[in-house]
Amino acid sequence: MQPVRRFRTASLLAALALTVLAGCATNPVTGKREVSLMSPEQEARLGAQAAEQVEKEIGLLTDPALSGYVQTLGQRLALHSKRPEVRFSFAVADMPEPNAFALPGGYIYVSRGLLALANSEAELVNVIGHEIGHVDARHAAQRQTRATGIGLATVLGTILAGVAGGSDAARAASEIGQVAGAGLIASYGRDQERQSDDIGQRVSAAAGWDPAAMSAFLASLERDSTRRAGGARRPSYLDSHPALGERVRVTAERAAGLTIVPAAPVAATRADYLKRVEGLLVGDDPANGACTANAFSHADLDFHLRFPTGWQCQNQPSAVLAAPQTRDALIRLELQGKGTDPRAAAQEFAQKNQIRYESAREDRIAGLPAYRALARAQTQQGELGLDMTWIVHPAGIFRITGMAPVAKFNAALAQFRETSASFRRLTAEEKKNTTVARLRTVKARAGETLDSLGKRSGNVWTVAETAVANAIDPAMTLQAGQLVKIAKAEAYRKQP
């Protein structure tokens, strides 16, 4: 949760819907004429808008060495793009999960989680090449064209619920059912993903890297996805992609028939690549807060909140959301702004959103001034009941909103109240014990296992996590000097 950022995805999608114009163009990859409702100029404009949002809503790694490394690899691949008019840019998104995505206009991102999972420069390059494939084949324009006329209005209606009326409560209500990381923009089709695999491997080979590394990375990604499936699943690079087994097989077969153009890599060996990512933040960043089990803690803002048992917590830049598996209720935590009067904050919210409280009262939570209110909100999803609590904290006034359809609101009210009542500042011990996990590389000793190496090195990853990150068997006996990626817990220092 980073309160300084604001959630503007809805307005961007509105722009996508309003700026498409009918046309016909030749696809740079296939050479075929196809109907397109988005011109290259529109792609560039919308991509630039979306890129601004990515920086605000997700955040980018600021490490100049690592960012420059990814930019260097990307620009070398871009020389082989089918669209020389596109000004490609490459950056590292501040996301803990393995992910990569391309925006219209050539804005390409790989996550820090993906950098940690990759085991060679060639693996990373093939992923970047895959994203170049989406841009080259104008998949965003194809996706927009297909969406228009077959339900785009319905999609936008859901996403933009209540926004036109200026209702924050209604906008928050639209997030019910989307807490599990469902994309606000439709995913690429499977045929588009297959085409991008093809383009990515060919571009990688033409630039001097082994296209077979795509298969190796996809295998690691599948293992990571399977491991994560045991818990709360986060968005993944695999979402809406073809079956992994198919992709591993097809990319391996394709690589065997491609010729690698001789060229010196930037990081020639796995050891060279690991030096590039040494010290990379893995997992959640304490500076943004972190979901742990059924709770959320924020070291920099100094607070802790507990959610109902079994609810899934999701940390977004502008708010923290939690919902049960049934997706029929939602709790939203956000920083409304500065101030010392929770009643005034509640009144300001009511005026801004044109709602009337059915009941309201002053309260104190963990010794902090608070104000509670019940209300209803009309949304395109129907009428919702709202349980709202404002709490004065040194960081500002926090607002906790529990919401559910009116038919289910009374049943959920006790859980909403228990959650808001759990809000408190961190203890001195909790602050002291806040750590950050960073990627480190250690050399194995002869005969060691991942378990014994982990205990010796202070690895906070499980054996299963370490095996996936290193693309090795969890039960294997390690060789002397073998390089193993681990995650090391280090003291966290609050950022200035």
Image: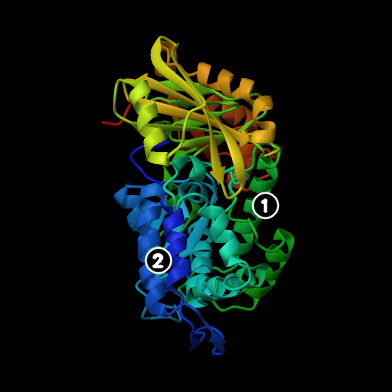
Mark 2 packing: few (<14 Cα in 10 Å), some, or many (20+)?
A: many
The tag earlier along the polypeptide, 1 or 2, is 2
- Real-space Cα distance between discs 1 and 2? 29 Å
**Amino acid at circle 2:** Gly
Q: Is residue 405 visible?
A: yes
At x 51% / y 43%, what residue is drawn? 170
Asked if residue 260 is positioned above or below residue 8 in the image, the reply reads below
Q: Which percent across, then down, holds residue 109?
A: 44, 58
Per the image, label 2 sits on a secondary structure element best described as helix
In the image, is 42 to the left or to the right of 338? right
**Amino acid at circle 1:** Glu
Q: Which percent across, then down, holds residue 231?
A: 67, 36
> Which mark is on residue 213?
none
Q: Quadrant of the N terminus?
A: top left
At x 48% / y 68%, what residue is drawn? 17
Per the image, label 1 sits on a secondary structure element best described as helix
Observer-nearest of 281 and 102: 102
Q: Which percent across, then down, holds residue 422?
A: 52, 17
What's the colour scheme? rainbow
The residue that label 1 is drawn on is 222
Asked if residue 343 is positioned above or below residue 188 in the image, the reply reads above
The residue that label 2 is drawn on is 47
Q: Which percent across, then down, holds residue 469?
A: 58, 44
In the image, is 72 to the left or to the right of 409? left
At x 61% / y 72%, what residue is drawn? 192
Asked if residue 119 is positioned above or below residue 198 in the image, the reply reads above
Observer-nearest of 82 and 35: 35
